[in-house]
Amino acid sequence: MRSLTVDVIKQAFLQTPGEKLHKKLYAAICNCILDGSLRPAARMPPTRDLADELSLSRNTILRVYEQLQAEGYISTRTSSGTFVTHSVLDNLKTHSDKTAIAAHPEASAALSTRCLELLENASASPAQWGDFIPGVPDVESFPHLTFKKIYDRVARRPKPEYLTYDAASGLEDLKSALSDYLRTARGVKCTTDQIIITEGIHQALDLVTRTLCNPGDNAWIEEPGYWGIKNILRMNAVNIAALDVDDQGLVPQTSPVEKPKLIFVTPSHQYPLGSVMSLSRRQLLLAKAREFQSWIVEDDYDSEFRFSGQPIPSLQGLDENSPVIYIGTFSKTLYPALRLGYVVLPNVLAAPLKKVHNELYRSGHQVVQAALAEFIREGYYAAHIRKMRQLYSKRRTQLVELIKLHLGEEYLGDYNSNAGLHLIIQLPTDADDIQVAKCANAEGILVRPLSRYYFNHRKSQGLLVGFASVQDKDMEPSFIRLAKIIRQNPSPS
């Protein structure tokens, strides 16, 4: 029997402009979900049927479905099929219609002050796949078949404990493989007892903030810095002090009025500017943390992707019994939809935070964790990182040359280091980076405005331009379109 969803998607596909078929199909299905043509829980057509109906290759359909699943639009149920998710429409409407909530007194009255503040400052983008999107790896280069073979092997005869509630804050096999990897690759000093497996970086940050801060406590963050930590601190009623960043990383206050309980830093590749924290600055920060009796939360962002020179060891590994909580994620090294991160805790914090983690979050995905443990143990993880480091280095070089050719060297940001998955394009002070990004986003170019990453009013104008997920053949034509949009603004003096 012919599926009605095939007709809905086909009609939308034919009406959607665009030359690249996979992007055209992706946009068509997204629009169908957002406008309600495809309702939550609607069964998606089998990839083979949709390929036949649209006269596309099945690989194209698979590529689009994988991306839609990675972004939470659809989900696959074993032996049942693929379905539109229940939550995506509500989540996207919440993001795009913040002002509508404020316009309805009954909604405002129902929500907490902290929730309303978060909605007012929401920064998460509903679009997570497009040219030059920052922070997204090349998911097409992931060894899907290799990982699937390992996963199928584990899932065929899973241990009973893989299929029940997780009571250990992560699978022991994964924590063991991860501790060995971190010790070798990042100089992190830890045992499996110090590791908690989380569902991504946000859960890790929320866990640390909830357990170590009382309402009214103080925290240092980088200025500019990651929007996610600002929102988590706001929701936990923690006071924020945004400290400047220079070419050596965060600049600590020597005599703060209020001592920080937590200090959040991205020393390996400062997000978003890109500076690498010098060894002397790391040592100073450790000394200040001890002086103030603070905990440093080290987000080892993009540490795997340094393209020249030797990586500086992690803060956590610089000192015995360091006051550092080390967090990381597999989102950049593998793919974001995996939703696996980790926290490495000082011994004194390990037991209480594990108990809180189990009480609040009840993690799962043990079969995936078991597969990932074998993926790491068998050397595939390290091999994949080596391969991607070479690929990303090439793409970074290509993007730098395109910036110089089509805009000028003066547009390269001051702190762009030879690391990470994005570059900063510096705009003149009288430019409007939010408007530039909005125009680019409308063209499917998902750059992000630098000014949105500032907590205080003093803001630089620029664009975060990701290069990791842009295919080589698409890099130049897409950048020419972006450069045209940028040139509509005043040139740097």
Image: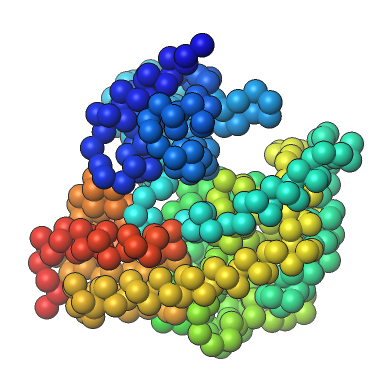
The foreground one among 304 and 121 is: 304
Tell whether 457 sits left or right of 347.
Answer: left
- Look at 25% across and 42% down and name the residue there: 18
The answer to whether residue 17 shows anywhere in this view is yes
- Look at 68% across and 54% down and name the residue there: 146
Of the 4 image quadrants, the one containing the C terminus is: bottom left
Q: Is residue 156 above or below residue 249?
A: above
Q: Is residue 246 above or below residue 65?
A: below
- Look at 68% across and 29% down and name the residue there: 78
The foreground one among 293 and 310 is: 310
* The residue positioned farthest toward the right in the image shown: 160
Q: Is residue 125 above or below residue 241?
A: above
Residue 290 lies, in percent from the top left, at 67, 75
- Look at 83% across and 61% down and name the residue there: 176
The answer to whether residue 242 shows anywhere in this view is no
Number of numbered tags placed on the structure image? 0
Residue 85 lies, in percent from the top left, at 52, 27
The foreground one among 342 and 247 is: 342
Residue 462 lies, in percent from the top left, at 27, 65
